[in-house]
Image (tube, rainbow, N blue to C red):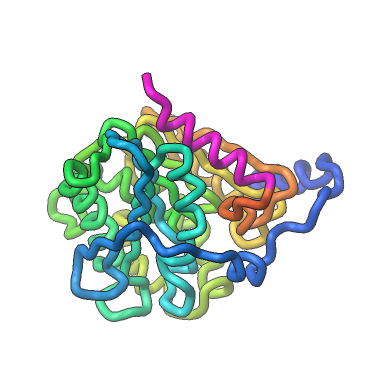
């Protein structure tokens, strides 16, 4: 941790002054959000649904799977918070499958429900792919903030022991996992969760005897590549959080995470189309889905 802090300090001293202020939470909340093409339920709770944005054309369509953030908490918006990204993708021929899930502090959420929801929503994608003309050979998982943790976990759940109630293999192999200001190592970041998200969240999400099942840093990912994108000016999930995850996987996994630090960007810039950093994120998504 001392090494991480020194690295962040050295980086901060070398960067030039920001050319613009990071996107504030209030500005992010005020972004107009269109209705999705359709909504797909995979469970009885209103949180257990998927927003689907479909591009024009016959397909087969590459798919960007999004998992929203919000502190794993029902006190924040659910999957609707990322609806503004749907048109950004569909106009480029990319379908968006945006997952909702029961949060840690709502009925059925936490361990194991939150994780089982993410797995079920991904299984639903595989089941419904023929109906929506999805190309399951061209899928990327993208998670923002708390959703970054869940995206990294989803790509790693196949390495869980058979007796775990969370164990399960993806029915497709994602080209990439792109974590946007996400948390990969709950063992090092968990102590900050009560300050950022409120009491009780981390205890419900990652009970002490289950931490190794839910912290992606303790698991082995199955994606072809992992990209950890951080805003240099992110005060909620600073770049050292991505570094900790990459360090934990070093020498243990066949996938070496790529670290991308975006200058002048805060936590919400990474999912705000008007911010310059969105162009960087979009390029990473398109590169992950590019035909081979």
Tell me which segment is drawn in magenta. 276-292
Q: Residue at x 48, y 80 (%)?
A: 199
Taking the image as shown, residue 108 lies to the left or right of residue 233, namely: left
| Residue at the top extreme of this rendering | 292
The residue closer to the viewer here, 59 or 82, is: 59
Is 216 within the magenta?
no
User: Magenta-highlighted stretch: main secondary structure?
Assistant: helix
For the question of whether residue 36 can be seen, the reply is yes
Q: Percent x, y for residue 97? A: 34, 51
x and y percentages locating residue 206 in the rendered image: 36, 66
Viewer-nearest residue: 40 or 249: 40
Specify the quadrant of the image occupied by residue 36. bottom left
Residue at image point 13% right, 54% down: 163
The tally of labels here is: 0
Q: In the displayed image of the protein, which residue is found farthest to the left?
A: 163
Residue 64 rendering spot, x and y as whole percentages = 39, 44
Relative to residue 195, is residue 179 drawn left or right? left
Residue at position x 40%, y 56% in the image:
67
């Amino acid at each position: 941790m001392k090494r991480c802090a020194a690295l962040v300090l050295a980086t901060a001293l070398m960067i030039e002054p920001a050319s613009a202020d990071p996107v504030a939470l209030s500005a992010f909340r005020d972004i107009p959000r269109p209705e999705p093409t359709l909504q797909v339920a995979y469970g009885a709770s209103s949180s257990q649904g998927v927003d689907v944005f479909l591009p024009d054309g016959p397909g087969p369509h590459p798919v960007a799977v999004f998992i929203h953030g919000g502190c794993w908490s029902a006190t924040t918006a659910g999957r609707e918070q990322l609806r503004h990204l749907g048109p950004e993708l569909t106009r480029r021929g990319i379908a968006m499958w945006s997952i909702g899930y029961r949060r840690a502090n709502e009925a059925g959420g936490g361990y194991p429900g939150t994780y089982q929801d993410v797995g079920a929503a991904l299984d639903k994608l595989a089941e419904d792919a023929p109906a929506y003309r999805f190309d399951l050979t061209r899928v990327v998982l993208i998670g923002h903030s708390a959703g970054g943790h869940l995206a990294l976990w989803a790509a790693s759940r196949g390495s869980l022991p058979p007796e775990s109630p969370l164990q399960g293999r993806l029915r497709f192999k994602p080209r990439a996992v792109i974590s946007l200001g996400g948390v990969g190592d709950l063992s090092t970041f968990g102590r900050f969760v009560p300050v950022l998200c409120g009491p009780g969240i981390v205890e419900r999400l990652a009970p002490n005897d289950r931490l190794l099942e839910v912290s992606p840093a303790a698991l082995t990912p199955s994606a072809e590549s992992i990209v950890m994108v951080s805003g240099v000016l992110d005060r909620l999930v600073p770049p050292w959080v991505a570094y900790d995850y990459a360090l934990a996987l070093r020498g243990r996994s066949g996938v070496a995470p790529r670290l991308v630090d975006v200058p002048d960007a805060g936590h919400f810039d990474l999912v705000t189309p008007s911010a310059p950093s969105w162009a960087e994120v979009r390029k990473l998504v398109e590169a992950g889905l590019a035909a081979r």
